[in-house]
Image (cartoon, coloured by chain):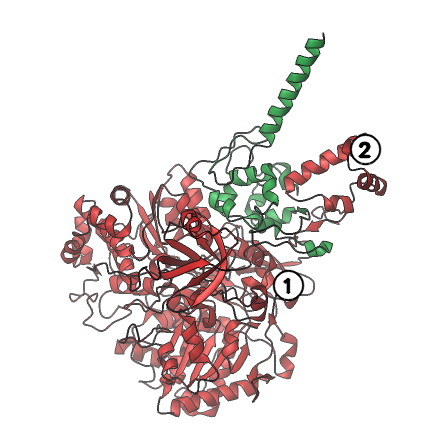
Amino acid sequence: MSSKQFKTKALFTPGEVKSLSTNPNLCNQGRRTFLKWGAALSSQAIVGGGVLNLLTGEQALADDHFDNVINWNYSVCGFCSFGCGLEIGIDHDGRAVAVRGNGKHPTNAGRMCVKGLYEHKILNNQDLRVGERGVYPMIRDQNGEWEKITWDQATTILSQKIIDAVDSPLGADSVATYNTGQWTLEEYYAFGKLGKGAIGTATMDSNTRLCMAAAVVGYLTTFGSDGPPGCYDDIENTDCLFLFGMNPAEMHPQLWRRIALARRSRRAPKLIVVDPRRTQTARSADLHLQLNPGTNLALINGIVQQIIANQWTDADYIERHTRNYAEMAATVAQYTPDTVAAITGVPADKIITAAQWIGTSQETLSLFLQGVYQSMGATNTVRMLCAMHLIMGKIGRPGSAPFSITGQATAMSNREAGGSSALAGYRNCYNPTHVSELENFWNIENGKIPPRKPTPITSNSDLQPEINSHVEMLRNGELNVFWIQCTNPAVTLPDLNKLYAYLDFDNPNRPYVVVQDIYDPVESIHFADMFLPAAMWGEKTGVYTCSERKVNIGRQAVNPAGFELRDNGYGAYSDLDITRMMADKLAAMDSRFADRNGNSLITFETPEQAFEEWKACTAGTICDMSGMSYAALEANNGIQWPSTVEDVYGGRRLYGDGRFNTNWEDTQGGTPDKPWIDPDGLSRAYLWAVDYEQAPEMPDSEYPFWLITGRVIEHFHSRTKTKRIAQLHQMVPENYVEISTSDASAMGILSGDMVHMATRRGEIMVKAKVTDTVKPGQVFTTMHFGDLDPDDIAQNEGRLVNANRLTMNWVDPDCKQPIYKHCAVKLARAN
Amino acid sequence: MKLTRILSKASAISLFVLAALATHAPAIAGKNHGGSGSDGSATALDPRFDTSFAIEYDHSCLSGGCHETDSQLVEEHAESFMTHTMVKCNACHGTHTADTLGEEKPNLTGYYPGIGPTGYLVGDDRCIACHTATFDDPKHPNKTWDCVGCHTPHRFATEQLGRN
């Protein structure tokens, strides 16, 4: 037994236990027994547990020791976007049995949040709390029951469905693909090639649309291209942290740890937090701007107004590196503190103080996330955050940047590699030079890549008739194939009751629905005609781009689930392998899906080969990764882009020279007439002049409360992975609603009471948590919980609990991201 | 003599009460800093490092008549910089393995009490899972697998608050 193991040894002799059980009065026990009790009680006070185990000699141990680990495998966390380095512990049987932080990784210095600490428990069936890994491709039989098929059969069936769809009057765009922010970069690159280069569909999107589309479009239309300008080291080099619509204490705990450590340093930067809730982050702030939901743009306009009015600007930088300052300044001039206070509910003196701290600090770092992206005015708020930094010249240097944080582990990779809505290598689908360059690189016919912006995942034409989407196409019977990969729209899309109706098997216009995922069941599988079992984090090698543009490598630690079934045509495969199988099968069945030489578009067989091709694809682009290699990524614990052969480590910060990607030949998006394109070719950033608009749905007499949605530290997105982990599930096992003390009192609601919540779109019933984390007139619920899987139905006794039955399918007109964060709701104590 | 003995006993009782109060100060859930710790070291957490949210949202453990009854535990948890950075109970303890002992699993929603606790020691590997760099640091004074020998459980700081 190693020194690290606990010895399980009874503290009391059997005679003492018997004596204690018959005469519990300690005063009547012997001196030795009394002293043991004292020691026992003291130790139990320390560990916080009971005493039963000490009496019985049994001891409940955390499943957390490393004694069975024989090898630590280099990897990176697969949950959020922060990119924490970690190692996966492997035992004698080749199973993942532990995770520990990588102490040498600069991002997290070995620290892990609770999700990462238990990440190895998502891999093996025996560790899963519910469900099991999918290992068989399956299709529905005539009775709607699942039937196992081989991979060869599955790829043949799906290829034929795609060929039929392309040949139909609806054409290639009737093949919709909807993927993720959880694949590896190589997988996005491969699938972008398949979707755009072989199938030729423009109906491609991913759940990153729900996550950070506003940041992408905000950056693109200001700087000419996507890509966060800052890096994590800015946290330790700033004097003022401006956290707008984000709660890193729960969403990005290692980012929060670095903020907390920076706050404890001699530099001690000020902390301003913008959030309607009193989160852990907000409670720790020097200044909490607790604004009304949906009023972000008014607040940031008000802060910019103060910065200009007090001349905390850099006139020289504005003159040399920006355009449209006069119009922007004229627009924000009307957003005086009193005006903004009336809109936002934030006292005017707090707005003035915030602007003063931002404006007068030597360095200011703005960090922003879903509270911006999923609220009214999302893209415009990002634009104004960028504008705020530009007019102060606080960008491209240590400690200053408008820095968007991403939600998922590889959402950034999808943005770069073009696995869904973007074009590979930050190329512009409206620039014929960019498109033909990529077509030639892929050796496909010119004109194959659709020269238009892909269709986003969701919208509602009843609210916004001018916007088309996958969901609208579902509604109108315009899709033949809907291929869902590594994402769970049956939990995460807004206004779910409508989506369920469109996907219902009784709907004659429904497409052929394919779900490619890691577990069975997953909520979206309920609507699937075909299931494809995929490998996951830890089971495949690939790279992950985190929020600061750093590319990390995750090495394969274990075999994919069902590996032993492969000889029989079954078993889970990596998404890269699945894409390659489909590309090969399509090319073999129909030469229209092959390259100019009649070969499959996917010629690489390993992730490293895919990465090498990808590197060549990025050479000379904004997100150049040609200076990287798998070995270098591991040796350096990640490298930021751009990284060229000549300057491997040159990607620390963007825009240090004040030159942006706004010239036509550089920009990532838009036609030449777009306002951010610099007509003089001087690479200047564009300053938007934008006005606040009221949210499309406000509380009224019928629906009197604001409903705010959000997240908890224990769960990740739709809980596909985290609900399998007992240590996470049991801390937050069900959805709940936060209600302020005064509102709860007025309605006679106590914590634990069941509350009925309803919006114009649906209703749910969850338990109340009475707290002053929310203001009166506002309630908060989490977005994690589905209510379709059998285990959830059983636990909730059939209650509907999914917050997205309530949310509104209204999308930002620019970035097409839904406004999940706020809508109007009514609630009452349920009988 | 009798009076002296009575006064002496009263003094002893007073000292005991004072010691007990110092050791088991009221639970401070909802406050943003603590007082002096049971080891007598200065432990007041900087008011900037609020822990009240983490305490409130550890409701699965710290409500319903369960671990919140251990005032020392709650006090130390509230004073910890790790709590401020949202390291909650389950990061180290997991959750109950009551099934291991053949008991009914507790309700962990925090809204009403479940079936009693089991006792849940934490191995040093749980610390090292995050603190490999500290453990490998040549300046770190102790190389034994005995983290809690120096770092008070739930507070974790040693001499200077915040070392965690």
Location of residue A155 in the rendering, given as x and y in whole percent from the top left corner: 52, 85
Tell me which chain the residue with mark 2 is part of.
Answer: A
Seen at 44% across and 87% down, the residue is A508
Query: What letter labels the chain drawn in green?
Result: B
Marks 1 and 2: in contact by CB < 8 Å? no
Q: Residue furthest top?
A: B1
**Please, what secondary structure does the residue beneath circle 2 have?**
loop
Nearest to the observer: residue A347 or residue A151? A347
**In the rendered structure, which amino acid carries the disc numbered 2?**
Gln
Query: What letter labels the chain drawn in red?
Result: A
Circle nearer the N terminus (2, 1):
2
**In the rendered structure, which amino acid carries the disc numbered 1?**
Asp
Please indicate whether residue B125 sits to the left or right of residue A36 in the image: left
| Rendered position, A100 above or below B151 | below
**Please, what secondary structure does the residue beneath circle 1 have?**
helix
Task: Establish whether labels 2 and 1 are both on one chain.
Answer: yes
Q: Rate crowding at label 2 as few (under 14), some (14 to 19) or many (20 or more) other CA atoms within 10 Å.
A: some
* Disc on res. A29: 2
Please indicate whether residue A542 sits to the left or right of residue A374 in the image: right
Q: Is residue A605 visible?
A: no
| Rendered position, A257 above or below A81 | above
Location of residue A6 in the rendering, given as x and y in whole percent from the top left corner: 72, 47
Give the Cα separation between the discs numbered 2 and 1. Answer: 44 Å
Q: Which residue is mark 1?
A: A127
| Rendered position, A51 above or below A557 | above
Figure quadrant of residue A387? bottom left
Location of residue A100 in the rendering, given as x and y in whole percent from the top left corner: 58, 54
Location of residue B7 in the rendering, given as x and y in whole percent from the top left corner: 66, 13
